[in-house]
Image (spheres, rainbow, N blue to C red):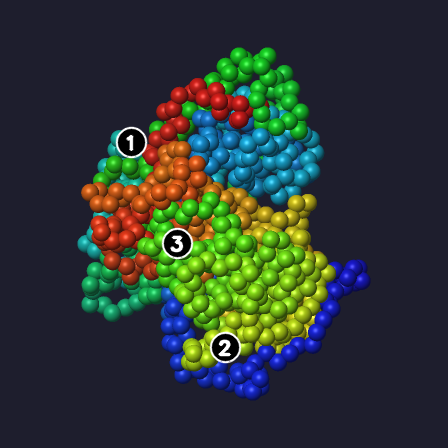
Amino acid sequence: MENSKTTRSSRPRLQRSERVFSESHLTSWEVFVRDSLLTLAWPDLLNVVSGSTASDLISRRGVFSRRYYGSVEQLQQPPEVDGQEHCRRFRIENGDSPGEKDEMFGSPSTPVLENPEYQTRWYFKYFLGKLHQNYVGLDGEKTAFFLSVVLNENSNQCVPLYRAILFRKMGAQKISLPYVQNKLLTVKQILSNFPNMERLEKNPKEIFSPDIQKDLLLLEEQEGSVNFKFGVIYMKHGQTTDDEILSNEFGSESFSTFLSLLGETIRLKNWDKYRGGLDIKGDMTGRYSVYTIYEGHEIMFHVSTLLPYSRDNRQQVERKRHIGNDIVNIVFVDCSEDNDVDAHGVFNPTCIKSQFTHVFAVVSVDAQRRYRLSVFSDEAVPLFGPSLPCPPVFEDAELFRDFLLVKLINGEKATFETPTFARKRERTLDMLIKDLYSEHMTDQRMTMLNRRAFSDVLAETPRHSRLKEDSRQIEFVRIGQALKLEAIVRGDAPTSLASAGAAGTVFKRSPWEANCFYPVFPASTILAADSWGDNRLVIATDDGVYVVEDGNTHRLLIDKTLQVRQVSVVEPHGILLLRAGASNREGKIYVFRLSQLELITEPKTRMDLKEHRLERTRGTHLYALSRTGGSRLRMCVAIGRRLTMFQWKHSAAWTAWCPSSDTDTVEGFTFLWEITLNENPSIMTILESGWSPISPTHSDILVCVGYKHHWDIVNGRSGQVQYLHTVKGDRPHLVTALDIYEDQEVQLLLCHNHTCHFQKLHDEGTANGSNGTNGSNEHDFHWNFVPSDIVCAFPYVIGFTNNLMEIRLIVNGNLVHTMTMPKLHLIASKNDIYFATTAPEFFPTRNDRLLLDTKVNEKPSPPSSPNVSPEARPLRIYRIPLHALNRNANHEPHQAAQTHHHCVNESPTSGWKSKSTCLTIPEQPRVSRSATSSPIPNKGKMSAQVK
């Protein structure tokens, strides 16, 4: 066993001795002292050169800290008579934790709903009321499961794809798979994309009964309620027990103002909307309550002063019965305006004797009518956003309401992931799935109709049974649409705009809303690209290398004789790096000065660029650069199994101080070391210097290397290799390794298949070389597809495929938004995020896809290239500003937060600017289109959807 471990993680062979990487007249120590002095003396100089602030640099590196979300403390327990009260620990968010006070990072406090139902309830949105196929079977552990597969009919003319849901006792797993014409997927191929579903006990059987739709909808509804009920407790200063707090018969004027901010006061008797467990017939739970609708969610507030009050019962059992059973409670602490006390320091969540309540949001208001918020969450509740600003004080009441409601909804959703609720949900799902399995496996109709083999594709129905199959399909769709309409009518539908048309509905600008950077880029394929400054891109295509400017035409730099596969613009040193070659064996690294590119008037050919080739790089199939803004620029080049490390001879600080002295191209790189690995690398990431078990000195350079099945950490100077992580399964697909930092400690976000795994570089299990189980899976999360590119832009992590963009929170992996775009391609993410997609006016259809909103009576449409035909399907380039993703919502103007998705042209006579067009996604309608569409499907689409 010991020998096998040594063989797998054996040290690579050190090919050459390391060379001095500093200037020839300086020792390494002198260079270190010089760079340190430059950094201390002119800290702003580096920011000017790199065109970014310190916070922008940190955001680009994907820095995040879970300390933003408070610290866990064990609060003092109130004295109990029986002494049996269980000690609870709470995570406290109040602006006082080290992460919340760290001004360098700012506060990612944009209020965004996590796991929004209109995007997570796939069966309701994409399956119910549409033709789809359902299967039942047993996995390798003889556990029952249900599988639903649909070919997305709404995207057939734009972005066709398969959507599959696997219902198991652990919950529903979802995945999107690309649809390739004339290459249909089998059920077995679809199942193999889910974890541990490669080998099955029995072949799954298809269910033809339309009643299965109601059963699967019930399974999906176990994820949680679409509507919410929250407790609102009025507390006076000095009250310390729940008996005292709940005995407040009336609230103050400031409390009444707060209630009017939360929602409208409604009469409970004969109330016909969501009631949140309150009596609507005989006023048994009070005459009035507070109700609101927020982004499609109906919310009923259980207000302590509006619930029945008993003068004889000091425990106020009727009030405790409702408030004590609410997962989330708001505690309004009322302190007199002239009483200078810490309203949030007087509340202790342990005084509320409820094991059911997991989240307390403590609210107070000061003499200036500013609201202050702190949040107490049971330590078992996973982290949830938005994180509180520092200080957590809100001057605008409407912004505070928006922030508070999002925090409450996200808090209740997070609570359902605690062990207590997760076990209950798993038991419920297990029982339901077992019952449904027994029911449908013994269904005689299924046995008689099922004549398809397990390996058959989702293809056309045989002609001899066409009439019978058509009748079945029509009935199947009719029943599904009836179920969908019934769910909408009773208010349990996961529609994002159930409040459409309601008074007070506000359309907010999403942080990820993209601006048009360049309207019509003629190339249909982008091979590689990088951003240059604030308004330029260097893009490599099959036709050559272009420079694209915001508002100007594109310019060809290098013609197609040089096939470029990788592009990097290193602005602190003023250089451009290209990896080019018709094949990997012919790959070479080319180095240019950015100043030289400005002077190019005629496109260069491959023969004109011989002097720009970097020695020792012939056969390069991959290279990686160290992060910009570091003390040194390093480049690791992979040539087959050989890794070669280069370093730029001038530091960023030296270049900033003496820019005229840094004019080198290929001669600027000096060779450091070279090693040979055991297999060809497919992924490389250069890590920041630091101590580790295999890097005891800060001068060592570590490289994270990904192969076919696993990742290693390589120290080229010493030749040591540290095993990092292995991907289990028969079909591993490594995507990327991103270096991120939590509390100044290096972590790696290892992405493979549709999974993202957080791995600490100095993990104790990793250092000992454990076998694939190293590292905690506590923070792992899964995409709904297999991404081709991943970008960290704190607090979000964004995944890209060729037709989908999925945005999640990096701190907990929760989904916040999904966008569908044809021919989607990530261009660059070094500064802002640039991506390209087919220009919307070239879509065959734009319904339920992308909208281009332009201001009326101004420039109506972007200029089109006269040489572009509709068949060419040119690309449009968009930009997501980084500052919009990590902005502080509390410190933005109120008007900006309520801006509708309209784009403003700077001037009718100006060139095409990035603000002229926005890429927006239409909100979901209150009633789904499928609920009112014809139950008879299109004949042309029927064969592509049903076997």
Residue 38, quarter of picture = bottom left
State the residue position of label 1. Answer: 272
Picture residue at 62% right of the left edge, 53% below the top = 583
C-alpha span from label 3 to label 2: 32 Å
The answer to whether marks 2 and 1 mark residues whose Cβ atoms lie closer than 8 Å is: no
What kind of residue is marked 3?
A: His
Observer able to see residue 358: no
Q: Nearer the viewer, residue 151 or 321?
A: 151
Pair 3/1: label in front = 3
Front one among 150 and 902: 902
Reply above or below: 598 against 697. Answer: above
Residue pointed to by mark 2: 651
Instruction: Provide the residue designation for mark 3.
Output: 554
Residue 284 place in picture, x, y as percent: 30, 36
Mark 3 or 1, nearer chain start = 1
Residue 350 vertical placement versus 700 (above, below): above
Q: Quadrant of the N terminus?
A: bottom right
Give residue 773's position: percent from left, percent from top.
Answer: 66, 56
Q: Nearer the viewer, mark 3 or mark 2?
A: 3
Looking at the rendered structure, the secondary structure element under dot 1 is loop
Q: Is residue 937 left or right of residue 498?
A: right
